[in-house]
Image (cartoon, rainbow, N blue to C red):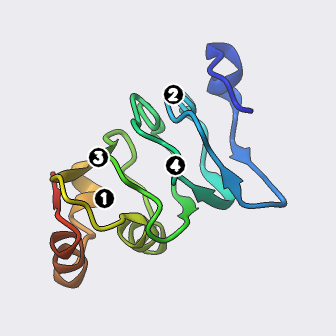
């Protein structure tokens, strides 16, 4: 379990897991982890119903992987300009097809890296890019 604690999160550079992490609560998990660059392992978001401030203030974040079709809610990664192309693809693949409209919000620099094919993939899953 990773819980928000401001002083700890400021120094956290990496989260490493030898297993795929099935995350039940996505609220404030990485909030204020300004030095976090990488989350190792695969994040299974299939049980998350909201991503409240999950990645807020993660300014150094570059790498993480998402289990395909496990994101069922809108997700915002507003403070991470350095997301890799592989991370962005993993997020896109992570969205499940939804009956309700979903939104992926990215930092403007990361958003500029999203390809037309990825936008089409998001659209086919009823997800928009913001």
The residue lying at 40 percent from left, 46 percent from top is 80
* Image height of 113 relative to 74, above or below: below
The front one of 37 and 100 is 100
In the rendered image, which residue does mark 1 sit on? 110
Residue 19 vs 27, above or below: the answer is: below
Of marks 1 and 3, which one's residue comes earlier in the chain?
Answer: 3
For the point 39% across and 67% down, the residue is 88
- Tag 4 residue: 61
For numbered disc 1, what is the local secondary structure? helix
Residue that label 2 marks: 31
| Marks 1/3: CA–CA distance | 17 Å
Q: x, y (%) of residue 20?
A: 72, 60
Task: Please state if 116 lies on the left or on the right of 5 as rendered.
Answer: left
Where is residue 41 shown, x and y percent of the image? 71, 62
Residue placed under numbered mark 3 in the picture = 74
What separation in Å lies between label 1 and label 4 (alpha carbons)? 11 Å
Q: Nearer the viewer, mark 1 or mark 3?
A: 3
Give the mark nearer the N terminus: 1 vs 2. 2
Q: Helix, strand, or loop for circle 2?
A: loop
Residue found at the far bottom of this picture: 117
SS label for mark 3: loop
Residue 30, compared with residue 5, is above or below; it is: below
Q: CA distance from mark 3 to mark 4?
A: 19 Å
Element type at marker 4?
A: loop
């Amino acid at each position: 379990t990773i819980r928000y604690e401001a002083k700890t999160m400021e120094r956290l550079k990496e989260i490493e897991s030898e297993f795929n992490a099935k995350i039940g609560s996505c609220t404030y998990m990485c909030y204020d982890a300004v030095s976090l660059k990488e989350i190792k392992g695969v994040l299974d978001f299939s049980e998350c119903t909201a991503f409240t401030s999950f990645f807020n203030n993660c300014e150094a974040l570059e790498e993480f992987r998402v289990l395909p079709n496990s994101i069922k809610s809108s997700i915002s990664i507003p403070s991470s300009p350095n997301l890799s192309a592989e991370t962005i693809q993993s997020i896109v693949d992570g969205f499940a097809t939804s009956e309700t409209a979903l939104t992926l919000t990215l930092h403007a620099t990361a958003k500029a890296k999203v390809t037309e094919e990825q936008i089409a993939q998001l659209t086919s899953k009823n997800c928009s890019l913001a």
